[in-house]
Amino acid sequence: MAARCILVFLLFILAINLSYQYNNTKFPPLNLYIGTDGDGFGAGSLPLGVQSPYGALRLGPDTSNTMDIPIIFNHLAGYHYSDSHINIFSHTHMFGAGVVDYGEVGIIPVQIDSIKHLQAMISKRNGYRSAFQHEREVVEPGYYQVYLDTHKINVELTATEQVGIHRYTYDKIKNKHHVILIDNSYTLQANVCTESHIKIDSINHELTGLIHFDGSLSGRFGGVTTYFVITLSNLTQFGTWNHGQITEGQTEIDGCSSGAYIILPDEQEQVTMYVGISFVSIEQARTNLKIQTNTLQSFDSMRTIVQQKWLDELARFEVSADWDRDAEIKFNTAIVHSLSSPTIWDESNGVYLGYDGKVHTKPDYMQHVYTDLSIWDIHRTQIPFINFHDAQRGNDIIHSIMINVEQGGDLPKWPLANGYTGCMFGSHADVLISDLIMKKENDNNLDLKEVVQALRKVANQNQAHDSRWDPATYIQYKYVPYDMEKTSAPLTISYAYDDWAIANVMNAAGLVDEAKEYYERGTWFEHVFDNKTNFFCPKDKAGNFHCPSNELEFLDPFDKRYIEGDAWHYRFFVPHNTSRLIELFGGRDNFIKELTIFFERGQPWKTTLLPNPYYWPGNEHNLFSVWQFNYANRSDLTQKYARWLLNHAYPNAPDGLPGNDDYGTMSAWYIFTSMGFYPLSGSSTYLIGSPAFDRIKISRNNGKCNLLINVHNNSPTNLYVQRVLLNNETLSTFPFIDHINHFKCSNDNQSTIQLDFFMSSTPVFSLDK
């Protein structure tokens, strides 16, 4: 008998291991902990948990350290890898942003001895939190599992676009009761709830409610209301609490210190719970729940459906490098992160809450309406990557921006949910629109007349929302005067980039003369370039520069004359006209010298806790700098430093991002750079770098257009490009690739574009001449 028991036990363990291997080998190699760690300015701020591709519902644990001391900058997305405790599971999260918002509808299962025990839990801050260990977590696209050590409960999560599915398995412990806590007034950011309500309907086995909150961004436009419907199989024993006091059997409660609890029958060791959310209404939350789960399919069925969506997406990207397996893991993980945002805003049956506060139905020509567009960040990499591999989605994003204009009146800077936030600066929606149009990926439903009107307005008038700084004064001086606005230099060079993008759109619309005016405005960055120091500096109305006064001031990332950076960080930020910037530096030799200093002095800076005063890999306006060597005929330096950054700024570790991912910005930078080319956003141009793989295959536009990249003789030391073939012919435009001439495919027939890189350990300069 003992031998049989041992055999059964061994077979059981083998079955678990086989199951674990199956669940972890059906996906390409991943490390979804990347971006969940880091401190200070190096925090990746990525949530850990579950969502569908681009889903609005990002369900996962919000964590804390052993001492339960909140470190806000490390918890902008709820989860931090260094933490030891899970406070609660909440249903929406920001995605790698440097600000906290969302994180509502908090739920956690617990085990209690008595109502008195439950009372003690809810009467203090995070009194129901649980210790956990990473060794008992499973993290996959669309599936998350963790064992709660304190409560002895196994938690499994999966999610559709607006529905979170929970499965709890309670350890059987004598005299312990199985409980689910619903903290309907919970938000990740403390003290931003302004209204909350929950109602228990035991007849229909559901809980309904809402929470209104004014978060760091959502509070700028009046806040967001999230409606929810929760359903589960057993609702016989329940109650509510308010200000830490329990009322047994009560079915309804209001207030921002309230919640509800459900006590399961002692014999019920496992429960599946479905949480539908909506930003429209409780009835719409119920509709989302029914449609997206096909009327409450089992947890395992829903997990399979959600994970198949991820598998289908990931199958379009293949990379291999036998000499660098970490690169494969980092690339695949970056793809998951890039496919996680922006946020699908329309709900089941296509309804969504508009910027006018009314309920609308998405147009038939759009697959989805999108929001949470961190435009200041994503215009650089994330949206160009979407335009590159998924033009339909890229069009939907630009249509969503134009819906923003139609319903709210103005082009947005950083739209969250259904509101304008005014976050950051510039009007980089101009660049997003230009990027799609210049690549000729825009569909026939994009009305260029409406686009042109919106661009004219943001460039020349004060908007009601998200305006540029005083357009009339800017146009009068052709720069932002320092004595009227201290951040004169970064605003001016940003507006120059935006106006160049507007000129591109004007040209595409056939407005050639108007385009010339905006191309001229695109050169106004010259007006804040100080020829004595070769830095961009604030300039007053009288024409006097106000540069930093000494070398240390040039390296001060907290200098109020600049925005999230120092004078060095903005020194090269002219992505649209690097050729003219080289002239301002006095020619290519001095430009190469100074740009090399920027990278060489930045390399010894090992910490990301504080900003790197030289090249800062986690700072958005530095992201293009490594590619600018190409304009000075030194593509070898682009290849050298790009490869160095892939290996050193992006480790295969939880702190594997150099800063906030900012809705896929850093992840998309890694994707492009590791493929060996990078976009000049707002144009059809890509710049060649040093590919990190031996083979790259991408199925673009739903398989209609494939890209195959073969990299010959690649290795850690062979990082320099000798030559490039495009469809077996020498790429005559090296080190540049054009989207239209080189990457554009016919939509009529499936086709494959092939790039062949030939690598060497020695720089080759003859190609750049």
Image (cartoon, rainbow, N blue to C red):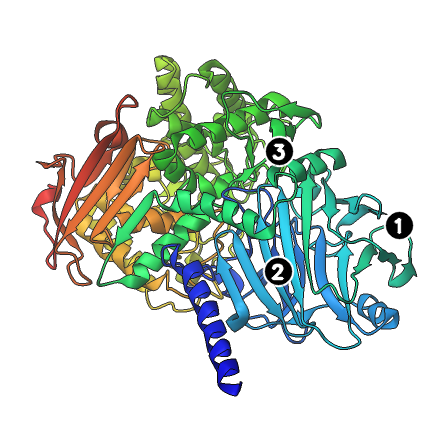
Spatial CA span between label 2 and label 3: 24 Å
The residue type indicated by label 1 comes to Thr
* Residue nearest the viewer, comparing 684 with 302: 302
Q: Is residue 306 above or below residue 147?
A: above
Q: Residue at x 39, y 20 (%)?
A: 517
Mark 3 and mark 1 residues within 8 Å of each other at the beta carbon? no
* Residue nearest the viewer, comparing 413 with 442: 442
Q: Residue at x 55, y 58 (%)?
A: 144
Q: Residue at x 16, y 63 (%)?
A: 717
Q: Residues within 10 Å of mark 2 (few under 14, many from 20)?
A: many
Q: Which residue is mark 1?
A: 251
Q: Earlier in the sequence, mark 2 or mark 3?
A: 2
Q: Judge left or right: residue 761 versus residue 351.
A: left
Question: Secondary structure beneath disc 1?
Answer: loop
Q: Which residue is mark 2?
A: 61
Would residue 488 be visible to someone looking at this image?
Answer: no
Q: Is residue 496 above or below residue 168?
A: above
Q: Earlier in the sequence, mark 3 or mark 1?
A: 1
Spatial CA span between label 1 and label 2: 27 Å
Q: Judge left or right: residue 471 versus residue 30.
A: right
Q: Earlier in the sequence, mark 1 or mark 2?
A: 2
- Give me the disc on residue 347: 3
User: Which residue ends up furthest to the left in the rendered image?
Assistant: 766
- Residue 435 is situated, as x and y percent measured from the top left of the image, at 38, 30
Q: Judge left or right: residue 462 versus residue 213.
A: left
Mark 1 and mark 2 residues within 8 Å of each other at the beta carbon? no
